[in-house]
Amino acid sequence: MRMNWNRQQLSLFATIFIAVVLFASAAWRYIGFASTGVMVNLVDDNAFLGIAAVGMTFVILSGGIDLSVGSVIGLTSILAALLIQKYHISPLIVLPLVIVLGAVFGAIMGSLIALFKLAPFLVTLAGMFFARGLAYTLSLDSIPVNHPVFTAVSQARLNLGFASIPAMAIVLLVVVAIGIFVSTQTQFGRAVYALGGNEASARLMGLRVERNQIAVYALSGMTAALAGVVYTFYTSSGNATAAMGLELDAIAAVVIGGTLLSGGSGTVIGTLIGTLILGMIQTIITFESTLSSWWTKIVIGALLFFFVVLQKGVARWSHYTVQKTSKGPEGQNKTSKNTASKLAVTAGFSFLFLGVASFPARVQANVPTQTEAVCPEGQYPGAKIVEGLYQLTGTHLKVGQTVHEIAELPDPAPPYITADGKVEIYGSAQYFIRYKDWNEFNRGGCFEIVPMNIVGHTGLPYKDIYTHSWDIRKFRIETRGQAPQEVLLGGAMTPTKGRPTPNWPEDNLNRRIYFFRLNDLREWMRDLVAVMGDVSTGWLGHSYGGNLIQVDAPAANVIQTDAPGETAFFYEKVSEDRDNGPYKTEMFAVRMNPFDKAIPNSEVKIFDLGPNPYPSTERVGNSAMIERTNAKTLGAQPFSAKPPVEGKPFLSQAQMNSPSRERVGNGYLVEGPRPIQIELNGRRIFLVGFSSGDFPTNSYHLNFMWSTDLMGPYKPLLTEDKKDLKDFGQDIKAHYGLSWVGRPSLYKTPNGTYQMLFHGVVKHILPDNDYAHWPEAYQLWEFFRCIFKVDVQITEGANGEPVIGILAH
Amino acid sequence: MKKLRQSNLFWPAIALIALLIFNLVLSPGFFTISENNGHFYGSIIDILMRATPLILASLGMTLVIATGGVDLSVGAVAAMAPAMSVFLFAQGYGVSSAIAGGLATAAIVGLWNGLLVARLGLQPIIATLIAMVAGRGVAQLMVNGQITPINDPTYAFLGTGYLLKLPFSITLAVVTFALLVIFCRKTATGLFIEALGSSAVASRYAGLNTFLTQTMVYVISGLLSGLAGMLVSSNIHAVDVNNLGMYLELDAILAVVIGGTRLTGGRFSLVGSVIGALIIQTVSTTINTQGVAIESMLMVKAIVVIVICLMQSESLRARFQWKRARPTGVTS
């Protein structure tokens, strides 16, 4: 052992080694990982973390800690956005100003620590509370920034030929370079190391301890503020909840980068590598489609443990070599025995830790990977409930069976008839069901479950039931003289933060409607650009599901590009959000030209809920009754804290009645517009089926509205007393023990009659037929939604309106 | 009077009383306790009930801080324990196994922290940072990251039940407090802890089993944090692993420091920590009931931390005493 490595070099070597191993194994395992695109994103996505971590390195090197960095990022972000957007001050003034303010904030904390000998932990904890509180007081809502200078900088890239580097990544690299220079080449840098090594000796050496301590915290405040500026560029918005808990990631990056938490030893370049290791773990976990995001935390914890123990080991090893020379063989023996026992303990802990970490996760929903044949009649009691009403899927369900055990196909679209006469039903799943012909479908006979390869615009598949495309419908596009083209249309999420695939729930805000077209690999590949709406950071505009309709088309699922009939596209979207969640979801339509391009500014709200909405559109059951304190002060990130409405558990009666909770109104929901053109005594009428009410409960309805114009305004079909939307599922729910009946898909059969598909939960699979007794482990929306088919009769009413009769005898 | 003023509890107690009086002035019905359905209701009961998780966590934190350590994993453990209970419920176990399993998980994490500190000699702040980061991840793993409802009536009783007209959680906190006081003050344990916090080297030479004492305080802290998390989850009938116990460790440290226990270790006061926790809860409740924006709560907390730290700061006190030394000498 003649290698003259000190502790600092050895730690740095371990960091580099881990980074290389991590990168090499990921590059070997995942195609596309070792690409410049992924690497550039890695640096870009972690720019603000890296910048804050550089400041943190100096603080930790000096023997202190700074818990306020995350809050300072939030404060800087919201303050900068506020000054630029509301007070119209130029970013060229605002940005330097907020960075100086960050330094001042750090200097104040540093003064308290240095002059009054207060614990850095407590002072910066107070700083964390104060900065976050101040940020909340400035604005609780996020403020989008659209100043021209701002957008120019955030989109600027440096083109190097083999890669184009975003501006924020360059900022990080510059900050790291300055950090390395300051820590190694300046008097201040050496003072920081001396302070962390031993404060008393540093003082005896004549170092001005207080001055340097204050400077260290001012530096950290400044880098945190710079990180806040970068964050604001990165998200193009100011957000008071930004970077919640980032201080922990920054500390982890510093420690994994080889810096000793007790101070005095470490490097800035190590911190950069530590930051990239954290980023790589995050990227790997998104590439590994079966792992959920929380594995990031577990792996970071394990890595932290490894590094801390490694540093201990290195310290002991150097201690041991000193002892060996001074004490001779006896001392050596004793120490090595001691080290062995400690290593054994360490190994035991690691084993335990891994044991905990490999805790079995609950089973994911069953997604068929190959075609399965299902015959309701042969194997099961049969699909026919009464004349006119058929249960197509889920006839074999038993009590308590959920979507975890079998594959469901909610939100059925009207049946698609292929060129060779097969009947296909699509819905919100990565598979569809297929009948061999119309007769088999009509009698609720045997079908196949056929998986589809649906991939995002990057070519990577959507990974689980929450991130796949929703509300899919297939259309055949016919152009004279050309082979017909098949497309899928549906809602899909766009990944953010540089990830290759979307994550649920944080990317749900970016759910928009896209076309999917078959590529050379026979995969359904998502278009790059949404049919309408942009990817935004708020709930507004959040939309999914899509239904094209062409006036006078030969069939409901057919669009002719050279036919004269107008084409329009019907969808729902969040038109009002409150408390960072969807409050009002309404239905809209745009005109299309050609079939896949929305005509700009042609969006029309096809049904206005108005100031006094219809009672059945209210959400009542799964209202979000969250304590305001939780929502506002502890609510953490807007992306992860509040799950979307669909994910909310059904709360018990006791919770709803609890006086200690404030009830936040959960808003209004009308969704899933499925238009159809019918002929009624010689008049052309457009009928739109939709659902309203409380998503996963009994108060979810089948509704219809109609108009003589494609783009409305549509008139809803009301109850006898004209006070509420008529629920066409009411009798079915009551008579046949169904619940959560919704998404009516009306269509014309080849015989000229009308039928309707809808989905519903069969109550006898709920324990005791009752929502109150469903198993604790399951959420209500996990119960299987079966597809039903019912005969429908449409006649003309006294005022020319269509009258719909459900023919289940 | 002078003796009273020198007591560590003097200023925290004054602060709490002042807060209560302030509330009484603002809302005269503040101290009223009414009986409804055989249960007591009122602002005071409400504050006590809401403070119980924080009280439990700060009791454990007091012992850890008294040994010169700190436990950052409190919030993560508070999420892990009920997550384990939910996991056991889902596996079909009964309520007693679920509660025992939750507490056992909390104790194991405490043991892990204790062994890292006492056996491997890691700095407490790093040792518990590991459990803080990984613990929440494990908790999310157990329940698949979702808000999971708990509908067991016995489990619900922990946080919402009533015993002798009082919320059961208050009784639970009082009993825990009493047991801990007996354990620390009627045996030599408290002395051991204080000795360890004052000087680990000296106590080792004095023959104290520092390993056992140090490990034990982390196990106790883990257990109490787990219990705190179970109370919270029982109260809302659901486990929200993403938010449950968030910042609980910081509040607990704050409560301990307000209660007069020094972060550097040594002498500790369990009563002080309870008072500290009550002060934090009373401030929250006051801010809530007075209709002040919740957001300002964080800023109030920050100012309270700094003021209390300054009051405890020896270097500041030295400056003051130097200035005050002569006049005091003359008048007394």
Image (tube, coloured by chain):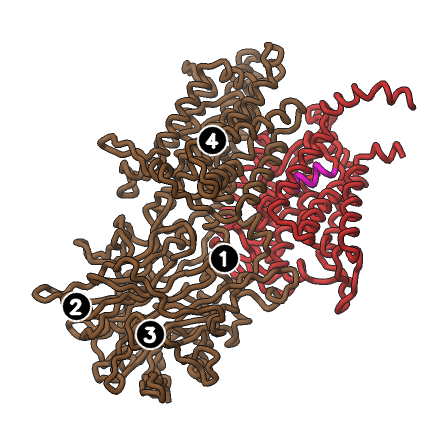
Chain colours: A brown, B red
Q: Residue at x 74, y 44 (%)?
A: B274
Q: Residue at x 65, y 55 (%)?
A: B231
Residue A52 at x, y percent in the picture: 47, 32
Q: Residue at x 46, y 21 (%)?
A: A8
Q: Chain of mark 3?
A: A
| Viewer-closest of B157 and A740 | A740
- Res. A787 visible in picture: no
Q: Alpha-carbon distance for marks 2 and 3?
A: 21 Å
Report if residue B253 lies within the magenta region. Answer: yes
| Crowd band around label 2 with a 10 angstrom C-alpha radius: few (<14), some (14–19), many (20+) | many
Question: Which amino acid does the dot numbered 3 rest on?
Answer: Val
Q: Alpha-carbon distance for marks 2 and 4?
A: 58 Å
Disc 2 marks which residue?
A560
- Asked if the residue at tag 1 contacts the one at tag 4, i.e. Cβ–Cβ closer than 8 Å, the answer is no
Disc 1 marks which residue?
A578
Disc 4 marks which residue?
A53
Q: Which residues are magenta?
A: B252-259
Residue A365 at x, y percent in the picture: 39, 61
| Viewer-closest of B218 and A598 | A598
Residue A688 is marked as 3
Question: Which amino acid does the dot numbered 4 rest on?
Answer: Ala
Question: Which amino acid does the dot numbered 2 rest on?
Answer: Gln
Answer above or below: position of A408 versus A94. below
Q: Earlier in the sequence, mark 4 or mark 1?
A: 4
